[in-house]
Image (tube, grey):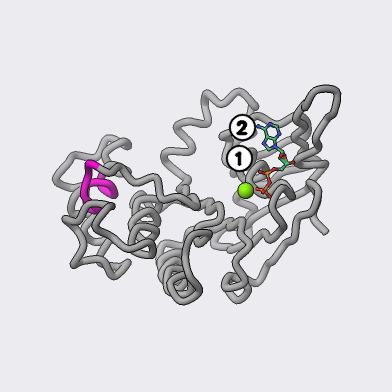
Amino acid sequence: MNNLLEAKSLSKFFKEGNEEIKAVNNIDFSIQENEKIVIYGRSGSGKSTLLNLLSGLDTFSDGEISYKNYKYDNQHKQLTQLRKESMGFVYQFHHLLKEFTSIENVALGSMILGENKKRSLEKASDILDKFGLSERLNHFPSQLSGGEKQRVAMARALINKPDLIFLDEPTGNLDKDTSKEVISYLNQLADEFKSSIIVATHDPEFRNFSDKILTMDSGVFV
Ligand SMILES: Nc1ncnc2c1ncn2[C@@H]1O[C@H](COP(=O)(O)OP(=O)(O)O)[C@@H](O)[C@H]1O
Ligand SMILES: [Mg+2]
């Protein structure tokens, strides 16, 4: 198996007045193709910071990260394209555009890669169907339940069949049963698309989601 993403001696420090917060402190991490990793940890343990570093959204203070053969230059610029083409993102709050319907929200994920509108809408319809939302294509976010909104957000993250999907507390706003349902869709679709997954969460429902569970505390894996 090949490493898809690998970080060595990775650190991120924040200055708070005279104090330095070691949000991520000298971490080694790797994920292989088609692997699912769940990162648990209390609030403030450094999960979001780690995801932001690994996805190139934030610059790191020390260490190195490589994605396939590409070494992060820590400058953001080249990473924008890599992120668009190869990565997907899902957050606690769905971040759907409220003036757009489900199918349009999802299609936008394809159109930003230059795909035409008609084909993007077809792809969006297909993937929303896989998420059990074929009856919700033309609904606006305000007309959807919390679980449905998160399924649309996941469909948007998956429309380009990314190699790697980052999810930060994706079920943080959902009740237990809805959370289970959303996780089950995510599991099926990740397997079908052979996407690797990194989830940062508090949610015990993710316990059975992956073979690899890591726990973070104070910027390190424990
Ligand atoms: N932009 C920032 N500026 C200063 N401190 C930050 C910033 N982002 C995160 N932190 C601090 O880094 C630590 C880890 O935060 P975070 O990665 O958000 O943890 P988690 O996602 O596990 O709740 C916390 O102490 C937090 O206050
Ligand atoms: Mg967080």
Relative to 111, does residue 138 appear above or below in the rendering? below
**Neighbours of disc 1 within 10 Å: few (<14), some (14-19), many (20+):** some
Residue 38 position within the rendered picture, expressed as x and y whole percent measured from the top left: 63, 62
Which amino acid, by three-letter code, is at mark 1?
Asn
Q: Residue at x 22, y 52 (%)?
A: 140
Is 168 left or right of 135, judged from the image as shown? Answer: right
Chain part drawn in magenta: 99-107
The mark found on residue 52 in the picture is: 1
Q: Are marks 2 and 1 in contact (CB under 8 Å)?
A: yes
Q: Is residue 186 magenta?
A: no
In the drawing, does residue 222 fall left or right of residue 132? right
Assign the magenta stretch its main secondary structure: helix
Rendered residue at 60%/66% (across/down): 203
Q: Who's the residue at 18% across and 67% down the image?
A: 135
The answer to whether residue 102 is magenta is yes
Would you name the residue on which mark 2 appears?
Answer: 58
- Image quarter of residue 155: bottom left
